[in-house]
Image (cartoon, helix red, strand yellow):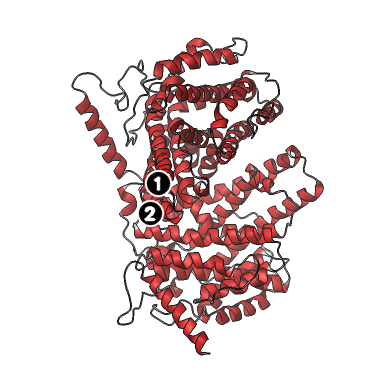
Amino acid sequence: MRPFELPDFYVPYPARLNPHLQTARTHSAAWAKDMGMLDPGLGVWDERLLDAMDYGLMCAYTHPDASAAELDLITDWYVWVFFFDDHFLETFKRGRDTAGAKEYLGRLPAFMPADATTGMPEPVNPVERGLADLWVRTVPAMSADWRLRFTESTRNLLDESLWELSNIDAGRVANPVEYIEMRRRVGGAPWSANLVEHAAGAEIPARIAGTRPMRVLRDAFSDAVHLRNDLFSYQREVEEEGELSNGVLVFERFLGHDPQQAADAVNDLLTSRLHQFENTVLTELPPLFEEHALAPQERLAVLAYVKGLQDWQSGGHEWHMRSSRYMNDASDGSAPAGSVLGGPTGLGTSSARAGAAALLGRTGQLAPGGLRNHAHIRYQRVGPLPWPDFAMPYPVRLNPHLGTARRESLEWAARMGFHDPLPYLSGPGLWTARKNEGFDFALCAAGIDPDASGHELTLSAEWLTWGTYGDDYFPAVFGPTGDMAGAKVFNERLPAFMPLDLGAVPPPVNPVERGLHDLWTRTASPMSTGGRRRFRAAIESMTESWLWELANHMQHRIPDPIDYVEMRRRTFGSDLTRALARLAHGHRVPPEIYQSRTLLGLENASADYACLVNDIFSYQKEIQFEGELHNCVLVVQNFFGCDLPRAAGIVGDLLASRMRQFEHLVAVELPVLFEDLALDAEVREVLTGYVAELQDWMAAILLWHECTRRYVESELEHPPAMRRPPGAPTGLGTAAARLGSELGALRAAVIGA
């Protein structure tokens, strides 16, 4: 019996079938046999099973425009990756052979040399044999940048199988945020996105490959592919194989749902990710093209890549509906290429298929990520949220120099102009000295840095003050008019106040620039050039995220849940906090250690804990007084269509689960990392200290929220509205004009002096 009925999927683009299907089927079957994948002694595949899974059909659907030779190559890659998955299951997962799995996976990078002419060891199994053959057939046609990205995604795909194995050993089901992050690494869709570039002959220009729009397109594509696969594979993976890494199971355990409710929730998240993909294409790609001055052929390559990802989504869905590998209403695969969800075929049925597609399109538009994300009524009276039972196993230690830091950071804020009236803003100022005193950022710093010197603590308190002032200043100045052009001018000026050589800077024209320059000079002076570069990048990560928030406000759009969680870490300044901590580690820890699954998991879990604490405490301030769209409680309420108590409860559960994950990583996975990488005593000591710093940070964040007056209802007021003197410019782009007038006035004052 089926555990649930498949939901109605949002499939906005029709699947098309490559005319070279039969050639690919014939070629891939012969290739798999040549590689030894059909060896009966392995007990993995035979010809009948391979034919039934029909990876030729999958690739013909997902790459409908590929040439015959290209389709053969792509199909071989998918035969290889699915064989790897099944071979790893039979050989290591079923027997819980972690040691053997590590040895097996440790050999595979040798078959992926950066230089395709580099020699390889002799393959000893079909996975190695297939990888060696595919590598030399694939990478010579691509750039060095693509090879690096493809190598990384392939290694992630292989190595993170150990994560699945360790979770089976521990009987542990991941929380939703952890699952989405790790599924990208082990699920293979980022790897598929790299192959789309190859199949479409459309490489992403290296200078934009790491930008937010391209990253979001890849991740939204990947998440949708993985969540779709989880729905179709639940019966095989969870019920037959005992697998714990499945999104439906994750939602069952986390939300307390039955399988049908969990499947529907997973499908809603899949739909939301597809809408995120569409929104990114329509709103973020055009400015990206202009800002990076992409040539016409480069723009065409990016759009061909986008089309390839869309083809993959629709084709992958059609294949899942037909493959014997999954729970579906499998047909014989003979339906025409235009069929929707394996629906009616034959004379006169095209109109029925079009009607079904239209119905699903409407369903998708009304689902999470569609129209409902733009329908929120702002400034609703909500009142403060009751505090949940915050899980906090770590005590707070306060720095003895707290009193001095309080006094000196307040004096510094006054000197920088944080308490002064601002042009174009009504009222006495964005902040007042009394408000700033009630915010008490020094208390937060004293918990974060309990062992810092007096000077270091004051500097930390001033950084917290500056970051929060900037976070308030940006929406107050640019939000009311949705002035993205002016906001970008403002943001593009900030790096000038963080010169790597500590040289001259332009005259600051607002308190944000003035405070940044002062802090940068005092903080960056003892750093190396590399340290300054990393620290500046962390600051830019936070300030650039303010543009993302403004863009959502301009669209009146509550963000997609996954995009929200990942961007919230940046808007909260988590990168800045981590950068300050890492700088103290010097060069004793190799940079790649920080990119390991364990360290990234620790950093992200702690960051999410802090962000969710803030969202709970700031809910009334943001929703009722500021008309904010970026709060996890609101995001959850919108996604599930639930009431406020239910949404707050889900956020509280997520907060607690992130803390449990942090503790699990510290207790179980960090010691394994030490042993696997054979880290010496000094590096272990530094990383253990870093974990203690993250614990101090989370404890301090919670204490500060409990004590600060920033979120107390009696202190809250609506933000100052834009005040325009008679004749002042208004409308799109006028903030840039105002900034220009400020610079002109400043130049005149300097000349007059």
Instruction: Residue 374: give x, y in percent of width and height.
Output: 32, 53
Give the farthest residue toward the bottom: 753
Q: Position of residue 442 (x, y in %)?
A: 62, 72
Residue at the (24%, 28%) spot, across then down: 353
**Disc 2 residue type?**
Ile
Can you see residue 395?
no
Query: Which residue lies under the disc numbered 2?
Result: 558
Q: Is residue 99 visible?
A: yes
Q: Is residue 219 left or right of residue 502?
A: left
Label 1 and label 2: CA atoms lie apart by 33 Å
First reached walking from the N terminus: tag 1 or tag 2 = 1
Out of 374 and 63, give the one closest to the viewer: 63
Q: Quadrant of residue 157?
A: top right
| Label 1 residue SS | helix
The crowd level at tag 2 (other Cα within 10 Å; few <14, some 14-19, many 20+) is many
Residue at far left of view: 348
Q: In the image, 685: left or right of 630? A: right
Q: Mark number for residue 186?
A: none
Q: Residue at x 32, y 56 (%)?
A: 376
User: Mark 2 falls on what kind of element?
Assistant: loop
Characterize the local packing of mark 1: few (<14), some (14-19) or many (20 or more) Cα atoms within 10 angstroms: few
Q: Is residue 528 left or right of residue 304?
A: right
Foreground of the two, 527 or 293? 293
Q: Nearer the viewer, mark 1 or mark 2?
A: 1
Q: Whole-percent x and y of residue 432?
A: 49, 80
Q: Which image quarter: residue 356?
A: top left
Residue placed under numbered mark 1 in the picture: 296
Residue 393: give x, y in percent of width and height.
64, 54
Task: Compare residues 677 and 664 and report the one nearer the observer.
Answer: 677
